[in-house]
Image: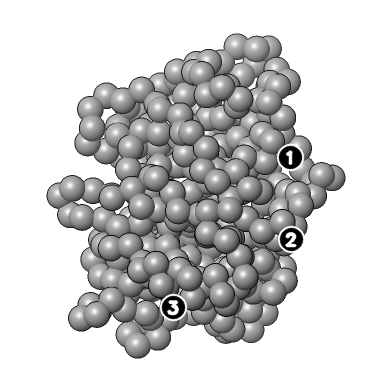
């Protein structure tokens, strides 16, 4: 259910912001020197994109060379249920949720270099880097965050440097009469802190209380803070170089088994310096993950339907969404999204397609086939 209006008003009195519209003081303006300064114009550059397919458990390679888009299906086998991908220093890291591993890939030659286990029953979701050799990984099923040494020569039994248990039982805010579990998902390392999105669920996707943001000191591996959110079923956190002092937190909202998401999601922003939530935007839709794209608009996956959600995070307002072609309602939702100069690439999980959208109008420039259940994308260049 939605939060009572009184709870929202109390939040406003505490942090001095507006719901649905950002303050003129916060958030800090975008860093215009930071990359990528994306605009509405497609620069025509070559691109290499990897798409992980959660059901067929393999990668699709999408390339533009000399203005022509090409697709290589089944380019490389992954582990079970690849859920997240990131590229750092020319290497691709795939988090395989059901086979409990981080798969390290050469994205140019499309070969697996090695694989790191997170341990049976952990169900890893998202990873981020503390430094060149250390990562933090959220583990949904075991309700913890792992600090892992990813160096090639580290013995397998010495890789996990620390296990950090997420809040549990009375440490979590509960709806009356409900027990809940943290169920960490998205995380982001910013400076010496790691911010972890805890969905706070009573069962799969069903919220047992408001979402929670856990704050971990990356040096000590200790939880130093816990922030109760307005949103429910908190899925992800996003830190963009364009807004260095802002952390964006996305919550999918309420979920009814057999019916699906209600479409009452939330986008919240945390001022990293003060540790306060300064903007809460109620969303008609169910935000999963997002990316800051052209003109600093936030483009968001929508777990409720095959639609790209758009938010002006400067003004604190939701913009009109962009519908994707749909082939049947079940599991037809916007499941992955990335931003390029002048383009937004968005996947429809059920359609097994990615769509290249004009970043200003939302019109579809191209429709490209993927494997079964595209669930994450990463830009190589």
Residue underneath mark 1: 36
User: Residue 137's x, y, as percent?
Assistant: 51, 65
The C terminus - image quarter: top right
**Image x and y of residue 95, in percent:** 46, 53
For marks 3 and 2, give the one nearer the viewer.
Answer: 2
Which element type, helix, strand or loop, lies under badge 1?
loop
Mark 3 or mark 1, earlier in chain: 1
Q: How is the image coloured?
A: one colour
Q: In which quarter of the image is residue 22?
A: bottom right
In the image, is 61 to the left or to the right of 312? left
Foreground label between 3 and 1? 1
Q: Mark 1 or mark 2, which is nearer the start of the sequence? A: 2
Q: Are marks 3 and 2 in contact (CB under 8 Å)?
A: no
Looking at the picture, does residue 336 appear above or below residue 116?
above
Instruction: Name the residue: 18% across, 48% down.
Output: 259
Q: How far is disc 3 from disc 2 in space, using C-alphas?
A: 33 Å
- Identify the element where label 3 is drawn: loop
* Circle 2: element type: loop
Compared across the picture, whether 300 is left or right of 153 comes to left
Which residue is the site of mark 3? 166
Using the rendered image of the protein, determine whether residue 250 is visible from the camera's viewpoint: yes
- The answer to whether one can see residue 99 in this image is no
Q: In this view, does 377 lie above or below 357?
A: below
């Amino acid at each position: 259910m939605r939060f009572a209006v009184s709870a929202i008003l109390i939040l406003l009195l505490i942090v001095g912001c507006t719901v649905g519209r950002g303050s003129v003081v916060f958030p800090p303006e975008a860093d215009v020197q930071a990359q990528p300064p994306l605009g509405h114009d497609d620069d025509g550059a070559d691109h290499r994109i990897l798409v992980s397919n959660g059901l067929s458990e393999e990668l699709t390679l999408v390339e533009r060379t000399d203005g022509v888009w090409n697709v290589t299906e089944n380019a490389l086998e992954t582990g079970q249920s690849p859920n997240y991908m990131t590229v750092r220093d020319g290497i691709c890291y795939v988090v395989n949720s059901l086979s409990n591993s981080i798969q390290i890939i050469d994205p140019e030659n499309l070969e697996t270099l090695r694989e790191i286990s997170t341990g049976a029953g952990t169900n890893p979701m998202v990873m981020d880097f503390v430094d060149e050799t250390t990562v933090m990984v959220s583990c949904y099923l075991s309700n913890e965050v792992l600090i892992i040494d990813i160096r090639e020569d580290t013995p397998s039994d010495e890789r996990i440097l620390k296990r950090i248990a997420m809040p549990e039982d009375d440490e979590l805010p509960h709806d009356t009469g409900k027990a809940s579990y943290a169920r960490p998902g998205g995380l982001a390392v910013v400076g010496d802190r790691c911010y972890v999105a805890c969905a706070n669920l009573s069962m799969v996707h069903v919220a047992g209380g408001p979402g929670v943001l856990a704050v971990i000191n990356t040096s000590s591996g200790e939880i130093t803070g816990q922030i109760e959110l307005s949103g429910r079923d908190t899925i992800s956190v996003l830190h963009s170089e364009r807004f260095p002092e802002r952390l964006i937190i996305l919550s999918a909202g309420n979920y009814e088994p057999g019916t699906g998401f209600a479409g009452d999601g939330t986008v919240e922003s945390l001022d990293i310096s003060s540790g306060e939530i300064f903007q809460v935007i109620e969303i008609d839709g169910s935000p999963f993950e997002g990316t800051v794209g052209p003109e600093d608009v936030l483009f968001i996956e929508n777990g409720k339907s095959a639609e790209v959600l758009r938010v002006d995070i400067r003004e604190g307002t939701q913009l009109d969404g962009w519908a994707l072609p749909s082939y049947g309602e079940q599991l037809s939702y916007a499941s992955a999204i990335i931003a390029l100069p002048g383009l937004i690439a968005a996947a429809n999980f059920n359609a097994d397609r990615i769509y290249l959208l004009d970043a200003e109008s939302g019109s579809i420039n191209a429709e490209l086939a993927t494997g079964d259940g595209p669930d994450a994308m990463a830009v190589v260049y």
